[in-house]
Each structure stands twice: as structure tokens, then as C-alpha cells.
Amino acid sequence: MESVFTFFKKYRVIGIALVAIILLSGCQAAASGQPIDPETAGFFDKYFVLTFSKIIKGVASFLGGSYGVSIVVVTLIVRLALMPLMLKQSKKSYEMRDKMAILKPEMDAIQAKYKGKKDTDSQRKMQQETMELYQKHHFNPIASMGCLPMIIQFPILIGFYYAIRTTQEIAQHSFLWFNLGQPDLVMPFVAAAIYFMQFKVSQLGMEPSQKKQMAIMGLISPIMIGFVSFNAPAALPLYWAVGGLFLIIQQLISKKLYMPKPSVAPASAGQ
């Protein structure tokens, strides 16, 4: 039977997915990429997608009609607004990692004690001893997962994404060398490369075993972004590229602030 910590770590994804389904259930128009009618729009379309669309248009108007620069600016504003939540989540993640390192010897002892015992009574006792260990070290597996920042940022980022897809004015403008409303051959590679760099930065300071476990997962995001970008308007890989660059900087800041410094072994006598 899995530990309480493993249970919450596994099933928090399901909880976030349920929130996503609830939020996105009313955004059929946004998902189709077609213009949204404010009169018939659902809650998500009306208060998230259309709001971000108005912001993109307003910033573009302020910047002389440049929708490319508007996407860059609004992406940075959104990411900056979410940054405190993301840094808080990173801090909790490092704190959780430190506590789990302290708990590990006793956790291993409990698992070794009940190794091979699959009966209900033994599994119940193992869970009980695990919970007592958490209480002893004042460790709350639910609070340590940091789900709230993820739940808060999800509708914001999805709303902004769909706003870019459904704002028709964007398709009528160009930025740098590409048309924002047409697929571009270069931007998919740019966006995928940036997200691959972001994955590599996220691995800094990780144990080799953790890096190995995340190797496949780290490739999924860049590959998916690159694949989708080939058939999407160039405005989307532009958004992903700017967001990915911001995430790299944000991760470097969080590692500088919260990642435990490696302990330095004392110098041997006589050196």
C-alpha cells in the first residue's frame, strides 16, 4: 500500500485536472479558435478569454498597433503577476525535499519492517506508523504539495492562451520576420529549444537519480510545443517562447533563493 505522501502526490494531478475540466467546460468557443460572442459566452470565455483579448488589444493600441510587442508585454505582465505564487511553490518544494531527506532513514526503516507483508493488518500498521512519523516531524503531506498556486495560475494561463487564439486582429499583423496569424517554420524550433533549456535549468542541483527519472518527462513538453506550433499561428510559439524565457529566469531566481547550498566538508588536519 502506498504511503500517504505518495497518495497525495499522485492524485493531486487528478484534482487539478478536475478543476481544469470545470473551468474549461464553458469555453467551447475559445477552444474552437473562433471569435467569441460576449452575449452567448460562457463564464470562462467571458471573464478570462475576452478580458485578456481586450488587454492585448489595449496594449497593442498603446504601442502603436504592434500586436507582436503586445503579446510579449502582456506575457511578461502575466508571468510577473504569477511569479510570487510560483516562487512560493518553489520554496515549499525545496522545504518538502529537505523534510523528506530528514524523514528518509526512518521511512526506510518502516518500509523494511513491513517488506513483503501484504496482509491488511500489516498495511494498516505501516500507514499508522507512517502517520506517526509525519506527526513527530510536523510534516503535512497535503500542505507540502503546494497545489493552490497551480490551481490559481491554471485558468489565467489558459485564458491568455485562448485569447491569443481568438483575437482576430492578431492574425492581421506581422512581428519580426513572421506573420502572427500564419504558421512559421522557425518559431516552433525556437519555442521548443527554449522549453528544453527551461527543463535543463529545472534540473540544476538535482540528484542524478532524479534527473534520470525526469528525463523522458522533460522531453515531452518541448516536443509537444514544437509539434503544435508547426500547425498553429506564429503568435502562439511567440507566447510560448517569451513565457519559457521568463520561466528560466524565474527558476534561476528560485534556486538562488531557496535551493539548499551543498555542505562543504571540513579540511583535513595538516592541510
Image (cartoon, grey):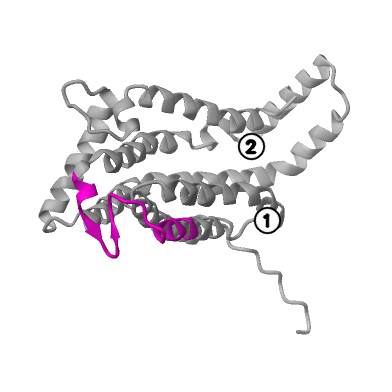
> Where does residue 142 sit, x and y in percent of width and height?
55, 30
Q: Is residue 180 in the magenta section?
A: yes
**Segment colored magenta:** 169-193
Q: Nearer the viewer, mark 1 or mark 2?
A: 1
Q: Is residue 14 in the magenta section?
A: no
Earlier along the polypeptide chain: callout 1 or callout 2?
2
Position of the C terminus by quadrant: bottom right
Observer-nearest of 270 and 12: 12
The image shows residue 146, relative to residue 74, as above or below, that is above
Location of mark 1 (residue):
207
> Where does residue 226 sit, x and y in percent of width and height?
48, 52
- Disc 1 is placed on an element classified as loop
Name the residue at 20% across, 36% down. 51
Observer-nearest of 60 and 157: 60
Residue 137's tag is 2
Name the residue at 54% across, 57% down. 259
Residue 27 appears anywhere in the view: no
* Residue type beneath disc 1: Glu
Taking 132 as reference, is 80 left or right?
left
Distance CA(mark 1)–CA(mark 2): 23 Å
Position of the N terminus by quadrant: top right
Residue 88 appears anywhere in the view: yes
